[in-house]
Amino acid sequence: MQKILSLALAAMFFLGACTEKDKEPIFAPGAAPSITSPAGGTSYVLTDSTASAIFTAFDWSAADFGYKAGVNYTLQLDKAGNNFADPLTVGSVNGLGLSNVTQEKINELLIIGKDLLGGEEANIEFRVVAKVSSDASIPTLVSQPISLKITPYPIIIIYSFLHVPGSYQGWNPADSTTVVYSARGDGKYEGYVYVSTADAKYKFTEGPTWAVNWGDNDNNGSLENGGADIPLTDAGLYKLNVDKNALTHTNLKTDWGVIGSATAGGWDSDQDMTYDAATNTLKVTLDLIVGKIKFRANNAWDLNLGDNDANKKLEYGGADIDVAEAGNYTLELNLSGAVYTYKITRN
């Protein structure tokens, strides 16, 4: 009798286990979400004056996981052509849309997150990623992306900087146009300063007064608090570097040019650029053919600038810049800020 009872209990346990298992949801994915609004290809121009306004309403269809489930939807963006290798999150909801995304939010994602240039139109892709919020093991369903044309507005990013007063600008430490920047905030500063006269002298100051200043007593590359004026022999555009941690500095006179397969000199000779004091930029107008270009200093590759992300921002040793159409162009190189930029305008 005891043996029969034990077998009956085992059978009941087995049946109960099967029943519980049968209750588990079966993942049988159907349709991924689909963005229904806005329409792909729509153009948007963001402005500082409308930063708090809603960018646009995003709507999408429901994802089908094969059973009723609580679904979390994440709206992401990335630069077109990047295949969402580095997506940024616009917002996450448990519903079928986002209607509270401001122009300011999109602008910050593009300017800061994607390193885009204000005032330049960019193709930006959006997609929706659907995930069952209660079960991390279930794969996500991802919508097809849509592409929007968005022109962000410039925003001011405040970088740490040192002033560079000198005889070339009236020994004025409050002049905010003669400064060097620490783009990473690591105590290392760099900037380009145009010196219009020969035999100029300069110093570095912390802030727009002489309260804290550095010079170089022996003109040997070391900085001393309150030290001697630093001499320059020739007029020209100087690349200045300061390491405030090590109290060292360098200066290098630079003459910039354009080089590349798109220029008349190819990769063998530079097309010289001229400094424009009115715009504090370097400029040249020349004929270009289909090909590539870069900017370099002093007719050598030791100091050259390219564009790794095709976003009009330059990096040392960066990628070649494409010229897609032959014509007469004005090229402008701007080395006056913490981030170096360029413009190529067809005439």
Image: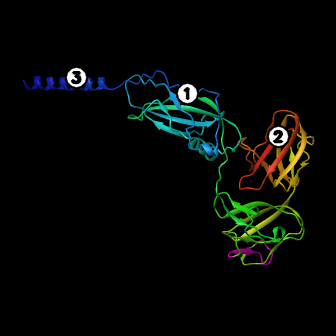
Point out which mark residue 15 bears.
Answer: 3
Q: Amino acid at mark 2?
A: Thr
The segment highlighted magenta reads: 211-221
Q: Where the N terminus falls, by quadrant? A: top left
Q: Where the C terminus falls, by quadrant? A: top right
Q: Position of residue 184 (x, y in %)?
A: 65, 57
**Magenta includes 330?**
no
249 relative position to 82: left or right: right
Can you tell which quarter of the image residue 83 is in?
A: top right
Q: Position of residue 221 (x, y in %)?
A: 77, 71
Considering the numbered disc 3 on the image, is that residue within a helix, a strand or a loop? helix
Outermost left residue: 1
Q: In the image shown, does 189 or 269 lie closer to the viewer?
A: 189
Local packing at callout 2 (Cα closer than 10 Å; few below 14, some 14-19, many 20+) is few
Q: Would you place residue 115 above or below residue 193 in this image?
A: above
Residue shown at 87%/33% (left/top)? 326
Q: Earlier in the sequence, mark 1 or mark 2?
A: 1
Residue shown at 38%/23% (left/top)? 67
104 relative position to 18: left or right: right
Point out which mark residue 345 bears.
Answer: 2
